[in-house]
Amino acid sequence: MEQQFEAVLTGSDTPVNGIVTRKSNGIYEFSALDESLQLTIARNEHGHWERIAGSEPYFSGWVDELAEQIQTTI
């Protein structure tokens, strides 16, 4: 079952508001409300969060921002 929650990432000019969808396989997909950004993250074999897909360009700090919001939601 997919779960969703609201999240905000730090954009270059303004915050990027979006919805995070948790997939059943532990993958989390962030989709910006204005469709400007898509970011998919998951834990690697060492338990660290990493980007596995998404739009370009992207800020590497978004992975940490999103992972922090995931931790406070689950």
Image (spheres, rainbow, N blue to C red):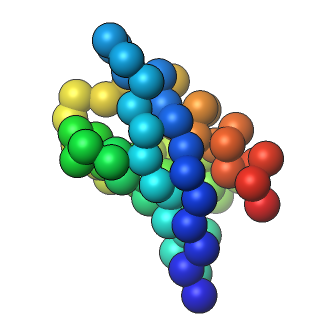
Q: Up-down: is 25 above or below 55?
A: below
**Which residue lies at the image location 60% right of the left edge and 73% below the top edge?**
3
Which residue: 34% across, 13% down?
Answer: 12
Decide if residue 27 is in sight here.
no
Would residue 9 be seen by someone viewing this image from the given angle? yes
**In the image, residue 74 above or below residue 18:** below
Q: Position of residue 64 (x, y in %)?
A: 60, 32
- The reply, left or right, for residue 23 in relation to residue 54 is right
Q: Is residue 74 above or below residue 26?
A: above
Of the 4 image quadrants, the one containing the N terminus is bottom right
Quadrant assignment, res 68: top right
* Residue at 52% in and 36% down: 8
Residue drawn at (59%, 59%) of the image = 5
Q: Position of residue 66 (x, y in %)?
A: 57, 40
Residue 19 drawn at (x, y percent):
46, 55
Give the number of marks: 0
Q: Quadrant of residue 37?
A: top left
Q: Residue furthest top?
A: 13
